[in-house]
Each structure stands twice: as structure tokens, then as C-alpha cells.
Amino acid sequence: MAESPERGSKENVPEAASKEAAGPEQAVKEKPKAKEKKAKDEEKGRPSVGAALIAAAKPAPRYAPTYRLEPKNPMKQERLEIVVKSEMNKNYADDYTFHPKYSLHMAAQVAEDIKARIKLLNFDRYRYIVLITVGEYLMQGLYSMANFLWDAEKDGYVNYTIETPNYFAVCTVFYIYFD
């Protein structure tokens, strides 16, 4: 059986009540409030929702494929080794002491410094992953392994280790060709 309009479903009852309570005057008052809010947002330097939609609707530029298979500036592993050794020796010298809290932040900073210096070498079409592990010698062992699927001719890694009686620091830089 179909319900009569008088009964209505439970969902329609609150809507009908709110429409009657609001009346036509309330609907007219809501529109200027929206315009005022939009004007305030524009005054504060915030873009309106409409401006964000227009900006998102612009298509991204498309570039023609180059059909190049080899990089213009090929990777030189020796130059990477020099960068890694110099940064690691500079930051983890004899005056370094291991501390669990500070070593985490220092390792992150050194990894970013190494990545920035490698990017300055301008090896085009390569992506880099810098992994630094720092630990304190306390009668424990450490085994680490990484597996990747890569092109053996173009991809590779550089590894450098610093060991002292108190701590160890291992830096591994993976370079992956991205065409």
C-alpha cells in the first residue's frame, strides 16, 4: 500500500516541520549571510570555494614523450661515494656520542643533507632513497636486508659504514632510474 501524503514517512516529518517553522522570510535571510561570508573570506585572503573549483578544473599540461632511453647526464657511482663519505665523516666524527633521542633527528637531517647534495650533481631521471641506521654497541646483533626489483644496468646502491667502539652508523643510498 502506498502511504498517503497526510501520514508521510518518519524521515519527511522533520523536514516538513522545519520548512513550516522557517517560513519564506528565513530562506531570504540566509542568502545574504552566504554572500557576507564569501566577502569576508576574500578580504582575509582566503579563496572562495568557487575559486578553488575553477583552479582545480584547469587541466594539467601534457608533454610530448621524448623517446630517450638513456639519461643525458648518466649516474657516476664514484661521485655518489664521495658525497656519502664526506657527509658521514663530517657528522659522525670522533666527537659524536650516541643518544637515542637526538640520534634519530640527526640521522634524518644527515639523510636530507646527503639527498640534497646528490641532487645538486644533476643526474637526470634518477630518484634517490637515503637510508641511515645508527645504533649503540650493547652486546646485540643487527641483521638488515632489502629487496628491490630493478634494472641491474641503471639502478644500484652505495653503502658506507662507520664503526667505533661505542656506536655504528650505516648509510645506504639507492639510486633508481626513472624514465
Image (cartoon, rainbow, N blue to C red):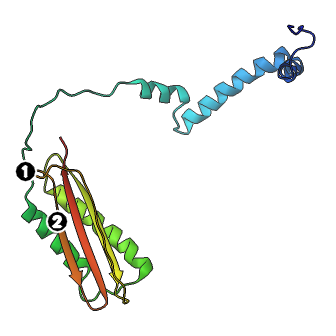
> Image check: 145 left or right of 20?
left
Viewer-side residue, 105 vs 156: 156
Specify the amino acid type for callout 2. Answer: Val
Q: For numbered disc 1, what is the local secondary structure?
A: loop
Question: Which quadrant of the view contains residue 99?
Answer: bottom left
Circle 2 residue: 158
Point out the tag, 2 or 1, that comes first from the N-terminus.
1
Q: For numbered disc 2, what is the local secondary structure?
A: strand
Which residue sits furthest right? 6
**As displayed, is residue 25 above or below residue 173?**
above
The Cα atoms of the two marked residues, 2 and 1, are separated by 16 Å
* Residue in the image at 22% along x and 75% along y: 88
Circle 1 residue: 74
Eye-nearest disc, 2 or 1: 2
**As displayed, is residue 166 above or below residue 4?**
below
Res 96 label: none
Please tell me how crowded label 2 is: few (under 14), some (14-19), or many (20+) other residues with Cα within 10 Å.
some
> Image check: 147 left or right of 155?
right
Specify the amino acid type for callout 1. Answer: Pro
Question: Which quadrant of the view contains residue 86?
Answer: bottom left
> Image check: 174 left or right of 104?
left
Where the N terminus falls, by quadrant? Answer: top right
Which residue sits furthest bottom? 165
Viewer-side residue, 72 vs 173: 173
Residue 171: x and y in percent read: 24, 70
Residue 157: x and y in percent read: 17, 61
